[in-house]
Amino acid sequence: MDHFPRSAFDDEIDALSQQIEDVESHRDSCKGEDRGDGSRPDHELAVEAYLDEMKRQLSFLADKKLAVSIASAVYTDSRENDENDSLDQPIVHDSAEHSSVMNEAPDTDEECIAGPSMTCPQRQDEKLEKLPQNKLQCCVCYDCYHPHQTHRLSCKHIYCRYCLKDLFLKAAKDQSLFPPRCCRQLIPLDAVQTAMSEAELAEFKRSEVEFSTIDRTYCSNRACGRFIPPCDIAVDRAQCSYCGSATCSACKNTFHTDDCVEDTALQATLALATSENWQRCFSCRAIVSLAVGCYHITCKCQAEFCYLCGLVWKTCECERWAEEDLLARAEEVVDRELEELLAAPVRRVRVERIRDELRQNHDCDHPGRFHRINGEGGRRFTCEICEGHHWDYILRCRRCHLYVCERCRRNRL
């Protein structure tokens, strides 16, 4: 029997085995670092979960290699048996039959006993994909995939490669999703890097630089408007590598050699913000407004500050909320969840109860599980984080009654 050359399974198995040895060596070197209460540290639990996943994948590859090897052997033996059987057939001397056989057209590949022009390993791979396997469900799209098409995060949630890649691509364009995370735990780029093209990977890394830069400069050319990284800024001159325009990194307008003049458009915006009692983020300088609720503001850049004075949250002596704003929020919460009109005394009692809950949980960090509210009768929900509209369901914090969508719950909070 012919010996088949070293397959891709061998390379993958060797690489995975080496990786398991390296991780086990790292685990053994870190033992003895238990917490004071006797519990195991989080990083050690994460390493154990990662090892279990790699060992399951190694077992799967070994089984698949064995199946392909057996199938290849069976295929080769059947071909040799067919050839031996053909040699044992008696020779036909009838001239008429011989003439008719010689005049027939040769068989095509599709009519040949050997089947279509595919190699045996290729046909076996195709069959193996159809075999029943334990599939894992993606926590985002809820479709089921083979284990090698999924990734289990440190928070135990399972993402398919497509949803995980989609999260990274969206995070590259939306700072509120950056860095990509699930259940407040960062997702490493290694988890999806092999599924991203070079252009997508380069775009993500550019966004990483952009979102980590505090005082950002964007190209003053309105037709371009791209972010200019700090490495392209020298002595207040920001050179755009896309369109070649130069921008003043101080006033963000077209670069000039004289003293930077006052930016009238910005001053007009700031004057409007002052007249409307808006506040400006101390980190990214974005302007925010408050309609209802307490004075605790969490900006899209994740900076937390007081809405009244703009200082870092809990570093000032300002009031935490205004009673009229808290009452307005309580009324909003009660009215949006009503299925039928309430009598005025009943509604007043419910509003008072919600206001007391909001007063106690004004600094809520949304612990534990959210309550799921399903949509019925065409009811539409609005996420209070991304302001997206949803019809199927919305998630509500059990303490502060915040409405959030599934993506914001997992990737923004």
Image (spheres, rainbow, N blue to C red):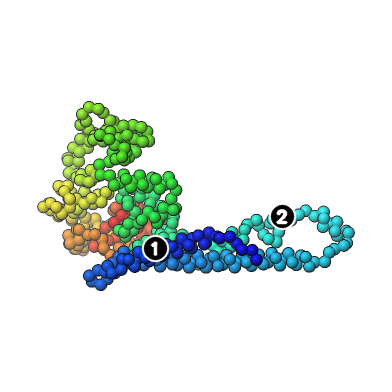
On screen, residue 239 versus residue 114, left or right, reads left
Residue located 29% across and 56% down the image: 413
SS assignment at label 2: loop
Say which of 91 and 283 sits in front: 91
Residue 130 image offset from top left, x and y in percent: 55, 64
Closer to us: mark 1 or mark 2? 1
Q: Amino acid at mark 2?
A: Thr
Say which of 397 and 110 sits in front: 110
Residue 388 image offset from top left, x and y in percent: 34, 51
Cα–Cα gap, marks 1 and 2: 52 Å
Query: Would you say residue 49 is visible in this rendering?
Result: no
Q: Quadrant of the N terminus?
A: bottom right
Q: Amino acid at mark 1?
A: Asp
Q: Residues within 10 Å of mark 1 (few under 14, many from 20)?
A: few
Give residue 22's mark. 1
Residue 34 image offset from top left, x and y in percent: 27, 69
